[in-house]
Amino acid sequence: MRWSGRTRCALVCIGFVLLFSAFSFRLVYLQLVKHEEYAGLAAEKHVYKQPIHAERGTITDVNGEVLAHNVPVANVVLDTSHLNREKVVEAVALLSRDLKMDADELSEKLGSDRHYIVLKRDVPESAADALRAKLREQNLRGIYFEHDAARLYPNGPMLCHVIGFTDFDHKGIQGVEASMDEYLRGQDGYRYIEHNRAGQEIVLYRGQERASRDGYQVHLTVDLNLQNIVENEIDAAVHEYSPEKATIILMRPQTGEILAMANRPNFDLNQRNTAKPEQMKNRAVIDMMEPGSTFKIVTAAAALNEKKVRPDTTIYCENGAWNYGGRTLHDHKAYGELSVRDILVKSSNIGAAKLAISLGDQKFYEYIRRFGFGERSGVELPGEINGVIRPPQNWSKISITRIPMGHEVAVTPLQMTVAMATIANGGKLITPRIVKSITSADGQTVSDFSPSIVRQVVSPETSRQISSALRGVVSDRGTAAAASVPGFIIAGKTGTAQKVDPHGGYEKGKYIVSFIGFLPADHPEFVGLVVLDDAKTSKPELNYGGLVAGPIFSRVAEKAARYLDLAPQPDLIKPPGAERVASSRTAPRH
Amino acid sequence: MSRHSRQLNRVGAASLARWIVVTALLAVTGLCYVYLSLQLHSLGDRKKSLETELAGLRTQNDVANVQIAALTSRSALQRRLKEGYLKMIPIAEQNIVRLAPTRTSPEENAIRPVANDQVGR
């Protein structure tokens, strides 16, 4: 078949039309249908989402003294694909000298084919600047500096368990750093930028940008002046008695504000990598102990509040030995009739047991729980434990005689402090607080933590009665004459509990001694707790709360009262005679 | 013939001028575009260098703040006190003058005036 010229021409035209139509369709497909996908792929090649790091907020004490803040540092990173292979030896020599790193380790890293290797973190800015200049001078490529910030704690080991620390990723992992991490860490921003072939940003093509929000400032209730007093005294106590562990807490009873909190062993926050786990525990909230006789305030308060007894009601204390439930309960001294007040002053175990029996298991248990034992106090510190308070159905026959004197229960030092604060505070249980407020970088208040009353545990009348009885404890008649402070009336209670053996039973010859009290007794400004675990005294018979923890409390309270400018009563200014304190060492102790 | 040639080679002055103006305008527009683009890049680079400078100053400020905090921290001051660099004398009780009156133990339910507990702190 022969086509005419016109036909052939038409066929060629149709061919071209079809061809260009196909091209057009393809073009429309690529430009419209696949636009997003290919634009994204293209952007990935040269657009980079640059993070804008938020600065972590600072932590301060109640007076604004800085406890934790940031110092600008640089992370030295390596991209081996940019490295000049001929200059590796030169680079290793320079880096090992300036970064104080092992040359073999560096050679291995520089010899790899990875694109991102962190050579060293937290290099000070001055050192980074010096290294940067040397690298430029020697024309060494492939080594870069990333801006970062390291957390710095100006006071080193002071308040270490409360402040806590962060990991290398700036995430709080202990203390307030962890519990307030949400507020402290801020919010990172970002910026879309484009690079030229040399890797430099083309500012003209900056894309979407979101500014970072720096972390908030967290202000603690802790007063560093009081903390310093406590730290010095706890160090002195550790030096004198070499206890396994020690804790001191100061708390304002009306507001629940923790004014000072120290534990031993401790560690330096700036050298936390060298600290052992045992040193890092905040024993005030994560350690359980049998409180011993300090727990008698709960027993007496419950009995008085239930009107089972009055402060002057006398109870027969069985002349020092009482058989109950097939087991004999002893007092440290043979007492006959003792008033409820004197049961606290003399720390009679039998008297306390009889008070609890008058209440009954269930009612006594209710009061223990009402004082906040067996549940977390709610303080803003991570890892707080409940303690162990067994319900009455799990009690043995003799539990009702042992729990009133602080055995068969496990409480945290903070729970004990809160319980005493309840007595000092007219019977109101208050939530302890370590964070006072949170403010933004420009000083605006973000959150203000106001005092929170949990419940009225006992009546104000009962708390006054207990408080009055506890004044007798810190007197010549009581178990803690050595806890007295010249010029002030102190209400307090001693505690000496045999140490619980983790494998069951008690550890022979090991005691947890404590003293808890408040000052001034009639209008308390602070409650203080001193606990020493396994204090080593010159003679075993000296290892009692009134003799070991009492004097420590006295020194702390005296200095704290002076700092808080509490006016001493002139008629009480004369300190108790040294002989009297010394003679009290042979007095009944509990 | 010569008359015809003259007619063919005649240049329209108005038309030429129009084209020259249009071309010039286009050239100037192009040059302006190039100049402004370069200016934008140059300002961008300047912005970047100022940002870098500002970041550097901020860093120096932060480092200085950290040094101040470290030197005035309680631990540092205590160390200096121990070294004898600072000297402090404790204030004796008889040298303290209190502006707040001494509070006596109130009787139960007794009305007592409100005292400012923070006085002298």
Image (cartoon, coloured by chain):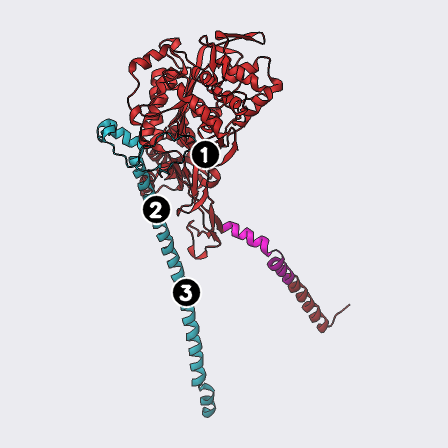
Chain colours: A red, B cyan
Kind of residue sitting beneath label 2: Arg
Q: Quadrant of residue A514?
A: top left
The residue range painted magenta reads: A23-45
What secondary structure is marked by label 2? helix
Chain for mark 3? B
Q: Is residue A281 visible?
A: no
Label pair 3/1, CB-CB below 8 angstroms:
no
What secondary structure is marked by label 3? helix
| Residue for badge 2 | B58
| Residue for badge 1 | A433
| Residue for badge 3 | B34
From the viewer's perspective, is residue A366 above or below residue A510? below
Quadrant of image for the C terminus of chain A: top left
From the viewer's perspective, is residue A345 above or below residue A177? above
What percent of the width, then of the height, locates residue A136? 33, 43
What percent of the width, then of the height, locates residue B3? 46, 92
From the viewer's perspective, is residue A25 above or below residue A266? below
Kind of residue sitting beneath label 1: Arg
